[in-house]
Image (cartoon, helix red, strand yellow):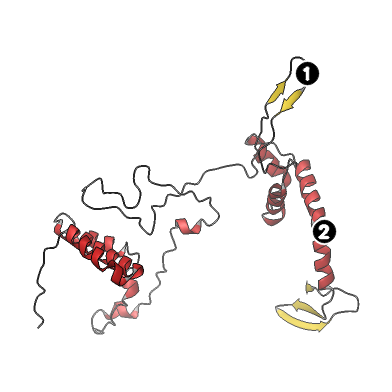
Amino acid sequence: MKPAPVRIEVSREELESVLGRVRERLGEPDYETLKAAIETLAYLTDLVQDREISLQRLRKILFGASTEKTRQVTPAPPNTNTAAEPEQAAQPTTEKARPGHGRHGAEAFGGARKVEIAHTTLKPGDGCPECQKRKVYLQKEPQVLVRVVGQAPLEATVYRLQNLRCNLCGEVFTAGAPPGVGTEKYDATASSMLALLKYGSGLPFYRLENLQESLEIPLPASTQWEVVAAAAATIQPAMEELIRQAAQGEVLHIEALGTADVVPAPSGCPARQQRL
């Protein structure tokens, strides 16, 4: 049996003095590692000495919140008592697993705008304002808040450029537009979104017109068509190139009644997939 370790009382100042003496011998990487280990030990000692902290909270601080269930990690032992409750053992289990609750964590919002918020009064390395004995350190995972707001499918921004006019010569001076505004009223993102809503999600132009009108950002169906048609003209060469490359295929895939047959493609006919 190993003897119990001897408890030695060492102050924070003494530890820092020891670290200062061995810094040159260890080198900067090893010094930072040893310093972090000693600071962690001092922090845990303070937590253990605090009688108000529970073991569950201490585990959460050290290892983080666990999302695993015991029944998922450790399988249930086999039922050896086959004689007890024979009727229950004979009945098959028909209960289905409950579906998910439908909620998503912050990691699921990959397309959301990320905003980093720094603490207004503290920064890493500052003294703790609560106990006034230790320093605060940056945590690996920040506190995350997800806020979802409603907005129109297509948003509009009105830029009001200031006009200045000379009362003698009548010359008018107009403020310049902000950088990145561009010269087109409907940019590439607007035309792409219109095409996705119409041909990707099946939203008719007139329904989107009514929705935009109710949100006070008018977008007539005729205008939507013109914007999409203009955008389609710009990508027409890419579509023609895809058709040209597809025409170089040597086989034609035909699916009929769940089976697939491969037959030679007719001469001069683009290779394509047909469903009979």
Residue at image position (39%, 58%) is 141
Q: Is residue 50 left or right of residue 214?
A: left
Q: Residues within 10 Å of mark 1 (few under 14, many from 20)?
A: few
Give the answer, above or below, for where 162 lies relative to 247: above
Mark sitting earlier along the chain (2/1): 1
Under mark 2, the amino acid is Gln
Residue topped by disc 2: 236
Horizontal and vertical percent for residue 68?
A: 34, 68
**Left or right of 52 in this view: 249:** right
Residue carrying label 1: 170
- Which class describes the residues within 10 Å of circle 2: few (<14), some (14-19), or many (20+)? few
Pinpoint residue 275: horizontal percent, then vertical percent. Answer: 76, 72
Instruction: Indicate which label's residue lies in the foreground, 2 or 1.
Output: 1
Judging depth in this view, the residue of 122 and 235 nearest the camera is: 122
Residue displayed at 53% across by 52% down = 112
**Residue at the right extreme of this rendering:** 268
Q: Position of residue 155 (x, y in %)?
A: 64, 41
Q: How many marks?
A: 2
155 relative position to 129: left or right: right
- Residue at image position (52%, 43%) is 149
Q: Quadrant of residue 255?
A: bottom right
Determine the secondary structure under disc 2. helix
Q: Quadrant of the C terminus?
A: bottom right
Q: In the picture provided, is 98 more to the left or to the right than 236? A: left
